[in-house]
Amino acid sequence: MSSRILIAGGGTGGHIFPALAIAGAIKCQEPSAEILFVGANGKMEMEKVPQAGYKIVGLTIAGFDRSSLTKNIALPFKLLKSFWQVRNVLRRFSADAVLGVGGYSSFPVLRYAQAKGIPTFLHESNAFAGKSNQLLAKRATLIFTGARGLEKFFPAQKICFTGNPIRDAIGLALPDREKAVAHFGLSAHRPVLLVMGGSLGARSINEAIDDGIEQLQQAGIQLIWQTGKPYAAQAAKRVAGQQGCFTADFIQQIEMAYAAANVVIARAGAMTVAELAVVAKPVVFVPFPQAAEDHQRVNAEQLVSKQAALLVPDAATKESLVNTAVSLCLDDQKQRSLSSVIATFAVRDAAQRVATELLQKLKEKK
């Protein structure tokens, strides 16, 4: 009998892409498995999941807004409405298991499934566990973790370290560098700096790069700049007529960008950290300071403390980000050192590990 698995979560690429990787691994191991996603209306999963060939149902839900308490007035009503929507979804789909990957839509789905006795599984990608997963952990069947040492957040007997699932294109060998550089219209004979602030962009990073274009040009450094949608038009205008600059709101073939890059500037979301370890790229992390529980700083510091990466605080981007990046781009020895250490953190088969453990638990139950 085919397994029916519901996957809940989203909001950013850091939740969506691992979820899609896990779904792919489940289908690989059990081709007849039926998979349904649940996301938040208006969020990027409503576009990315159907593009990957899966069905998704959207909930009327939003996260807690830390910037303005008044914006949270409607939150309890949205949460109640989402529980009603979840009840209807689970009645229609009758899931054998529910997997939560984090994000707004994860909590109501997992909480309702637990109340109904449906086996629930969590994937905690960060080195500092999110509040929702901490609340859900007690009644979860298993908790898959992307980092070690999360016993302070979860019952030790339920933890299963898997690493963080990455996109298939990155888990395979990267494209040839010359081909990748040509893909962006750049030269193979000059260093390339890849800048990415996550799937939604990062204003502080974008503004620092905007201010530092001339400095990068003078140092002979080429630029691949993923801006996110809000900054895309301004960035395109800024690099118009400049040699050795490529900019886009979102880079679909990120494996090409990784292959071309000598150095990377990035946020420190769990997905980004996992990918950079697999591709073994020297990186300057700029953790997002408003991330829940400051988890991006914790993610980055796990690597920085082992000399596997550099870190520039968000508040210092204007003064020191471009200087740090230029210095690293021109220091081949430092690049080799960072690359060799960050590679030791790589996990290539995380999605397969999650799929194997989840399907095994379902077989035991049946």
Image (cartoon, rainbow, N blue to C red):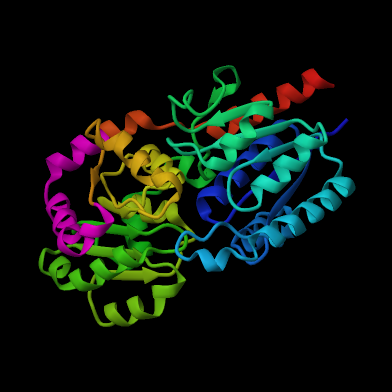
Location of residue 244 with respect to 191 vertically, above or below: below
Residue 244 drawn at (x, y percent): 24, 69
Residue 275 drawn at (x, y percent): 42, 43
- For image coordinates 71% across by 41% down, the residue present is 110
Quadrant in the picture for residue 174: top left
In the displayed structure, does residue 228 sit left or right of residue 72?
Answer: left
The magenta stretch spans residue 155:
no
- For image coordinates 20% across by 56% down, the residue present is 191
Viewer-nearest residue: 294 or 362: 294
In the displayed structure, does residue 117 sit left or right of residue 180?
Answer: right
- For image coordinates 75% across by 56% down, the residue present is 80
Quadrant in the picture for residue 207: bottom left
The magenta stretch spans residue 316:
yes
Viewer-nearest residue: 139 or 94: 139
Q: Is residue 8 visible?
A: no
On the rendered image, what quadrant is the C terminus found in? top right
Number of numbered discs: 0
- For image coordinates 62% across by 46% down, the residue present is 20
Q: Is residue 278 visible?
A: yes
Location of residue 265 with respect to 135 vertically, above or below: below
Residue 91 drawn at (x, y percent): 88, 46
In the displayed structure, does residue 134 sit left or right of residue 194?
Answer: right
On the rendered image, what quadrant is the N terminus found in? top right
Magenta extent: 313-340
Residue 221 drawn at (x, y percent): 18, 62
Location of residue 150 with respect to 80 vertically, above or below: above
Q: For the stretch drawn in magenta, what is the main secondary structure?
A: helix
